[in-house]
């Protein structure tokens, strides 16, 4: 019998590549060979960030194809990126698959593509390969996307995705209440980006309908109502990092592990971990206000400040702040986040509410202070604060989040034990779902049995 061979294709952004790589490691554990397809740009970033720590195992082969953008073009412009990917990558992907399939023994059995890459699902179908969509965000977000036409028909948004008015909706009872002006496509960039996103969502929705499986990095405990509303979405999360020596995390920035030694020296349950994922940027004033807020909390903190978080504008301020705060507070450019969140010294997570950060935080029982930036992060904030009740929102009404609000909410989070009790309960149920016999474990094993039956 030949070995099952899966092609995994993430959307080229950090919050998509990491969970797709985690999924690949899970597939490998079941004896499956994985070819992991990045864009050339992403591939080069990952390899560079690894520095000399080359930890790629034999069963995950990294390959890459061009994304269609020129060297030096802004790949954080999601509208442009999404538009260009459609134009260039389908043909390149087809050529890559044809090349791999020339081998008699190593043909691709199945393609697992990010649900945001409808064109990759289309290529897979066209070539007669088993087609699976992997959704790295919340099921609620996917349901919002599936509801696009109804939202247009009901006049809640126009054809270009612009909300008719600033109001709230609920797609089904117990699902997060969503504010129309915070619909993902409406807060992802300018009007042009919104329009491109809407067109991409329409195309992806069609492609997702023909995928044989839609699996997502969530659990029935995290999203009971959403997953009951759309039972075709099968949760297999939380995807966890393993300590295996050959584990490749697929970071875009080199990890600074010195923070783990620093955490070892802190009291249990005392540290505020502050990180905003891979996209968030801050203006000059807001960044300084955050720094003052952390200083005034009078608690040890670990703050991830990416080199591009402020386009270098606060370099002197940040350097001085970092030196003055150390060793009470520590600043790094990119942390081994999953290890940080599982460290016993960490008490709470000041987070931008990216879905991966949320899954990682809830799996480790931390409480959250929410600072959403864009896209689906507002829905995720609602999950944290209104549904799971494991965190607090910051006040965004005055246009700037103040140091007073930061210190006051951190204090509230650390003093009110109810937050911690609920966070530990969510952790327990999340971990149970991936144990033998748990709901995510069962979905994943069913998926593996299905795919292996085609080898
Ligand atoms: N991350 C990390 N180190 C950091 C900050 C983030 O490894 O210092 C990882 C984090 O663990 C998560 C991913 O980067 O897996 C960010 O994904 P998320 O969905 O939270 O946010 P996004 O970057 O998509 O906004």
Image (spheres, rainbow, N blue to C red):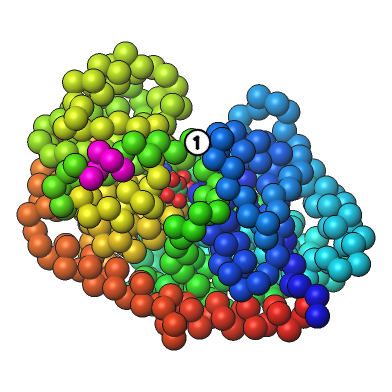
Residue labelled with disc 1: 253
**Element under label 1?**
loop
Query: Which of the 4 quarters of the picture holds residue 228?
Result: bottom left
Examine the residues drawn in magenta and state their main secondary structure. Answer: helix
Visible residue check, residue 241: no
What range is drawn magenta here?
Answer: 260-264
Residue ranking furthest to the bottom: 437
Closer to us: 413 or 373? 413
Ligand 1 near label 1 (Cβ, under 8 Å)?
Answer: yes
Residue 369 in the image: above or below residue 1: above
Residue at x-position 55% and y-position 50%: 248
Q: Point out residue 46 in the picture as x, y percentages from the top left corner.
A: 59, 40
Q: Magenta segment: does it hold 321?
A: no
Quarter occupied by the N terminus: bottom right
Horizontal side of 368 relative to 111 (left or right) equals: left
Tell me the crowding category of disc 1: few under 14, some 14 to 19, or many 20 or more residues within 10 angstroms, Cα based: many
Horizontal side of 351 relative to 355 (left or right) equals: left
Count every numbered label the image shows and give the total.
1
Q: Point out residue 438 in the picture as x, y percentages from the top left corner.
A: 42, 82
Visible residue check, residue 401: yes
Closer to us: 332 or 152? 332
Closer to us: 419 or 445? 445
Residue ranking furthest to the front: 245
Residue ranking furthest to the left: 415
Residue at x-position 23% and y-position 65%: 423
Residue 147 in the image: above or below residue 18: below
Quarter occupied by the C terminus: bottom right
Residue at x-position 68% and y-position 56%: 58
Q: Point out residue 63 in the picture as x, y percentages from the top left corner.
A: 73, 48
Residue at x-position 8% and y-position 59%: 416
Q: Point out residue 273 in the picture as x, y percentages from the top left corner.
A: 26, 44
């Amino acid at each position: 019998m030949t070995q099952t061979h899966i092609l995994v294709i993430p959307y080229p952004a950090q919050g998509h590549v990491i969970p797709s790589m985690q999924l690949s490691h899970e597939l490998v554990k079941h004896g499956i060979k994985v070819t992991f397809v990045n864009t050339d740009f992403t591939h080069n970033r990952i390899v560079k960030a690894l520095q000399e720590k080359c930890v790629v195992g034999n069963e995950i082969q990294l390959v890459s194809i061009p994304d269609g953008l020129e060297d030096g073009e802004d790949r954080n412009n999601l509208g442009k990126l999404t538009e260009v990917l459609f134009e260039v990558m389908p043909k390149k992907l087809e050529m890559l698959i044809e090349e791999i399939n020339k081998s008699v023994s190593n043909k691709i059995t199945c393609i697992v593509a990010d649900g945001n890459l409808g064109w990759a699902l289309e290529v897979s179908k066209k070539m007669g390969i088993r087609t699976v969509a992997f959704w790295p965000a919340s099921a609620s977000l996917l349901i919002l996307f599936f509801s696009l036409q109804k939202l247009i028909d009901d006049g809640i948004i126009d054809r270009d995705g612009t909300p008719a008015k600033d109001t709230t909706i609920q797609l089904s009872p117990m699902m997060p209440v969503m504010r129309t002006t915070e619909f993902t496509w409406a807060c992802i960039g300018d009007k042009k980006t919104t329009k491109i996103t809407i067109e991409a969502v329409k195309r992806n929705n069609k492609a997702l309908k023909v995928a044989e499986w839609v699996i997502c990095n969530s659990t029935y405990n995290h999203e009971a109502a959403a997953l009951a509303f759309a039972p075709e979405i099968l949760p297999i999360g939380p995807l966890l990092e393993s300590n295996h020596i050959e584990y490749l995390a697929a970071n875009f920035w080199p990890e600074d592990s010195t923070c783990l030694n620093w955490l070892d020296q802190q009291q249990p349950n005392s540290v505020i971990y502050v990180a905003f994922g891979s996209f968030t940027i801050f203006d000059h004033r807001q960044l300084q206000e955050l720094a003052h807020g952390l200083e005034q909390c009078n608690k040890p903190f670990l703050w991830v400040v990416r080199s591009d978080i402020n386009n270098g504008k606060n370099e002197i301020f940040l350097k001085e702040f970092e030196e003055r705060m150390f060793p009470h507070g520590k600043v790094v450019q990119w942390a081994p986040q999953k290890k940080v969140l599982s460290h016993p010294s960490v008490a709470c997570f000041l987070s931008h509410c990216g879905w991966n950060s949320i899954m990682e935080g809830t799996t480790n029982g931390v409480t959250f202070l929410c600072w959403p930036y864009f896209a689906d992060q507002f829905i995720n904030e609602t999950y944290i604060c209104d549904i799971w009740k494991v965190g607090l929102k910051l006040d965004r009404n005055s246009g700037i989040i103040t140091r007073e609000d930061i210190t006051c909410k951190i204090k509230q989070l650390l003093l009110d034990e109810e937050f911690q009790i609920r966070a530990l309960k969510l952790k327990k149920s999340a971990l149970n779902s991936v144990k033998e016999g748990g709901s995510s474990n069962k979905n994943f094993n069913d998926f593996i049995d299905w795919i292996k039956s085609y080898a």
